[in-house]
Amino acid sequence: MFTFNSEAEVFLHKAPVDFRKQINGLALIVQESMMLDPMHTALFVFANARANRIKVLWWDRNGFCLWMKRLEKDRFVWPVKHKGDVLRLNGEQLTYLIAGFDIFRFPPHQRLNYGAVG
C-alpha cells in the first residue's frame, strides 16, 4: 500500500474535476477555486465524477509532482455531503481514503494532549 506522511497537510477538493486537467489546470483550481497557494507544502487531492480516479498534486521545492490512482472495479468514498468546498485532512487519512476506507463515516479517535500525568 502506498502511504503518505501522516503529518502531511492535505486539502481535498470535493467537486469532481475534469481528469484531462494536468498540473497547470489543477494548480489553477487550487489557486482560484480553493483559494490556496499551490506552491504551499500541502497535498491537494481531486477526484473525477465517477470517483474511480484520484489525483494528488504537490509542490516539491522546485517543481510540481502529480500522483494518480485509477481503480479498475470500485470507487473511492468521496465526501459529497460534507459542508464546504474543501476538506482538510492529514496524510494518514489520505492513505486510508486511497486504500478504500470510509474516513468520513468512521473518523479516528480524537488526539489528546495533556500537560502533565495524573
Image: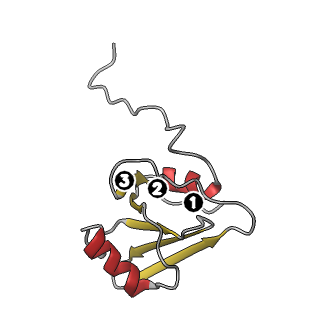
Residue drawn at (64%, 55%), measured in percent from left and top? 99
- Name the residue that disc number 2 marks: 91
* Location of residue 43 by image quarter: bottom left
Answer left or right for 95 relative to 10. right
Residue that mark 3 sits on: 88
Query: At which x and y percent is residue 23?
Result: 42, 84
Left or right? Give the position of 103 relative to 11. Answer: right
* Residue 25, x across and y down, in percent: 39, 84
**Residue type for callout 1:** Thr
Residue lying furthest top in this view? Answer: 118
Mark 2 or mark 3: which is in front?
3
Dot 1: few (<14), some (14–19), or many (≥20) neighbours within 10 Å?
A: few
Position of the N terminus by quadrant: bottom right
Disc 1 + disc 2, Cβ < 8 Å: yes
C-alpha span from label 1 to label 3 = 17 Å
The amino acid beneath tag 2 is Gly
Residue 100 x, y percent position in the rendering: 64, 53
Where is residue 40 drawn, in percent x and y?
Answer: 29, 70
Q: Give the quadrant of residue 76.
A: bottom right
Query: Residue at coordinates 51% horizontally, 60% vertically from top-left?
Result: 4
Q: Does residue 47 sit above or below 18 in this rendering?
A: above
Q: Are marks 2 and 3 in contact (CB under 8 Å)?
A: no
Q: Which residue is mark 1?
A: 3
Q: Residue shown at 58%/46% (left/top)?
A: 102
